[in-house]
Amino acid sequence: MSKEESYNRGMELFAEDKFDDAIAAFQHALDEDASYTDALHALAMTYSHQEKLDEAIEIGKKLVEVAPDDELAHTSLSIFYQQKGMIEEAEHIAAQARTLGWKRQLSQKNEPPKD
């Protein structure tokens, strides 16, 4: 099974509230490609839904490391920190997400119009 098939299967399982099976599917996708950002994000969110916040934070940190310019990765990690009551860390990561958002907006504003 390809990493995409494993990821898609994990998403189906997540939608069915079969979180342990979804985690296994996301892990399989990550065994194929350890930096597969979609699978990392889905895995972190699944852990969060199970209230396994330490695991969600660990995966969230890896996601931010793999995709340092991904606003959603930073925002998700901030939420995981907030859920765990780690407010200082949550605010720090949220500020990074806002900065990335501003940079994206500026770059889009400065792009030449498309024909």
Image (tube, helix red, strand yellow):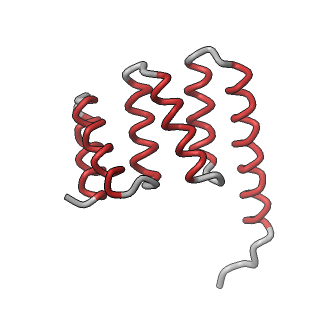
Query: With 53 as the anchor, is 9 left or right in this view?
Result: left
Q: How far across and down, in percent of the image, does residue 72 sit?
A: 58, 44
- In which quadrant is the N terminus drawn? bottom left
Decide: is 35 above or below 53: below
Looking at the image, which residue sits at the far top? Answer: 85
Q: Residue 47, percent across and down?
A: 40, 28
Residue 78 lies, in percent from the top left, at: 63, 31
At x 48%, y 22%, the residue is 53
Residue lying at 28% horizontally and 29% vertically, measured from the top left: 19
Name the residue located 70 percent from the left edge and 34 percent from the top edge. 94
Figure label count? 0
The residue lying toward the viewer, choosing from 52 and 111, is 52
Image quarter (top left, top right, bottom left or bottom right) of the C terminus: bottom right
Q: Quadrant of residue 50?
A: top left
Vertically, is 54 above or below 27? above
Judge left or right: residue 96 versus residue 83: right
Is residue 102 found left or right of 11 in the rendered image? right
Q: Residue at x 27, y 43 (%)?
A: 10
In the displayed image of the protein, which residue is found farthest to the left? 1
Q: Nearer the viewer, residue 111 or 65?
A: 65
Name the side, left or right, on which 103 lies relative to 47.
right
